[in-house]
Image: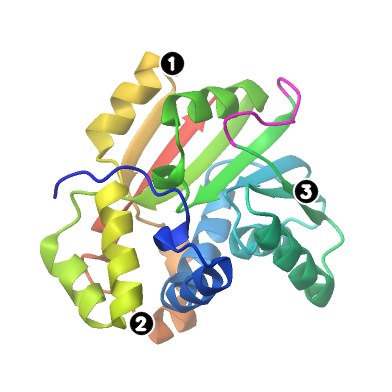
Amino acid sequence: MEKKERLEEEFELEDESQAFEEYDYITSFIAVNYSLMADELSKLGDFQQGVAVDLACGLGDLAIEVAKRYPKLRITGIDISQKAVEKARERVKEEGSDNLDFEIGDVHKLSQEDNSVDLVVSHGGIHHWKDVSRAFSEIHRIMKPGGLAYLSDLRRDAPDEIIKEIEQNLPPAQAKGFINSVRAAYVPEELNKILESVGIKNHSISDQVFSRETIMKNKELLRKSKMMSSNFSKLSQIIVIRK
């Protein structure tokens, strides 16, 4: 699939309220991913306490799941959209999470100090970032020595049959947004070159697969998921960075 330029706004919609409707609809398909990612963290490190950030947090889905599992971990969700941050804050009030907050911020110029963050997570944000090299440099800058970044995003080389399967199960507006997102995404080789170019050596890129333990914890959610199949892991990729 030919690469499309990064997306300025979610699904290229000028009406932000409509963008949130699209976001909610797509999230209903991929909600299980947030729980899977949050559970898989226990396989990658000890995050019982410390500082974490969720980049391009949207309405806070991933940050909320991480906060549930790590009540002593201080988590900040960061998004460039003021409306997204406002809605995420409203959700936190409903959830009652006292270890989670949200702030407006730009991944290309993060407010966090050098070597100050134990864990960086992100789901579905990379293909929206204007300058991915700079974003990765910022992520690495704020990570503590021994820290971890656990990032997930679509991949442009996902199997056509999976893309078509998802597209056919979405209304036209959402289908267009999904295809645009896939076209704007990177393939692993591109991300590897970008990471190497900014001096990040300790990283790995793989299909989005999860441990058996994580799968078993989420078996009920997986049964209900609208978008799970044997090839679903090839729709997205996981980037792990260690410092």
Magenta span of residues: 107-115
Disc sitting over residue 159 in the figure: none
Distance CA(mark 2)–CA(mark 1): 38 Å
Query: Residue 18 at what x, y percent from top left?
Result: 51, 74
Distance CA(mark 3)–CA(mark 1): 29 Å
In the rendered image, which residue does mark 2 sit on?
226
In the rendered image, which residue does mark 3 sit on?
73
Q: Is residue 110 magenta?
A: yes
| Furthest residue in direction bottom, as rendered | 224
Amino acid on which the number 1 mark rests in the picture: Val
Q: Earlier in the sequence, mark 2 or mark 3?
A: 3
Marks 2 and 3: which is nearer the front? 2
In the rendered image, which residue does mark 1 sit on?
198
Which type of secondary structure does the marked residue at label 1 adopt?
A: loop
Report whether 23 appears left or right of 191: right
Identify which residue is drawn at 39% across, 45% down: 127
Query: Residue 69 at what x, y percent from top left?
Result: 69, 61
Query: Residue 151 at what x, y percent from top left?
Result: 48, 44
Instruction: Judge by depth and name the residue closer to the eye, 164 or 196.
Output: 164
Which type of secondary structure does the marked residue at label 3 adopt?
A: strand
Query: Residue 24 at what x, y percent from top left?
Result: 52, 75
Report whether 120 appears left or right of 218: right
Identify which residue is drawn at 29% across, 23% down: 193
- Classify 10 Å Cα crowding around label 1: few (below 14), some (14-19), many (20 and above): few
CB contact under 8 Å: marks 2 and 3: no
